[in-house]
Amino acid sequence: MSARTAASRRTVLRGVALTSVAGLGLTACGRVEDKPAGLTEPVELGAETEVAAGSARLYPDHHVVVSRAEDGTLAAYSTICTHARCPADKLEETRLICPCHGSEFDVTTGRATREPAVAPLDRLSVEVRNGTIVAAPEA
C-alpha cells in the first residue's frame, strides 16, 4: 500500500467519524423545524385565581408561563427556550428550566439567568377577560 493510499483512506475514515459525531449533535438538539412555535393567536389559559400574587403558573399545552407580581400585575412569556427552541417544561417557583441544555429564566422578567440561553423569553400580552387569563402574541 502506498503512502498516498493510506493518507486517502485515513482522510475518508476521519470524515466518516466527524460526520457521525456531527450527526449525533443534530439528533440530540433536533432541528428548528421540529420545535414548537410560540403563540400565533390568543389563547384562554385558565381562571385568574390560578396565579396568586408572587407566584407563577406553567401552561405547558400552550407553551406559556404566567407570573403575578405582589401588586397583582400579570406577565406572560413563551416557554420556548431562546437557545435551541426546546419547550421549557419545569417551573420552580419563578424559575423556568429548559430540559434540553439547562438554560434557566426568571418568569417575572423573562430574563435568561443561566446559559446557554442569553436572550430573554418572548414576551406575550396578557389580560383577564371575564375571570379568565388570556395570553396572545405581542403586537
Image (cartoon, helix red, strand yellow):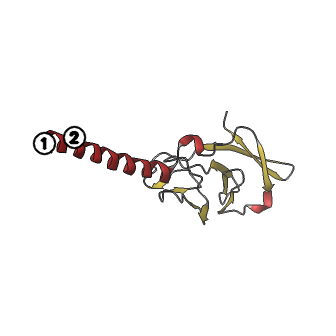
In screen coordinates, is 54 left or right of 101?
A: right
Lower position in the chain sequence, tag 2 or tag 1: 1
> What x and y, as percent, mark residue 20?
39, 50
**Res. 2 mark:** 1
Give how far apart the Cα atoms at labels 2 and 1 are: 10 Å
Name which residue lies at 69% across and 62% down.
Answer: 53
Tell me the crowding category of disc 2: few under 14, some 14 to 19, or many 20 or more residues within 10 angstroms, Cα based.
few
Q: Quadrant of the C terminus?
A: top right
Mark 1 nearby-residue class (10 Å; few <14, some 14–19, many ≥20): few
Instruction: Residue lying at the far bottom in this picture: please name it.
Output: 92
Front in this rendered view, residue 30 or 134: 30
- Residue lying at the far top in this picture: please name it: 139
Q: Label 2 amino acid?
A: Ser
* Horizontal arrangement in the rendering, residue 9 relative to residue 20 (left or right): left
Quadrant where the N terminus sits is: top left
Q: Residue under circle 2?
A: 8
**Percent coordinates x, y for residue 76 in the rendering:** 66, 49
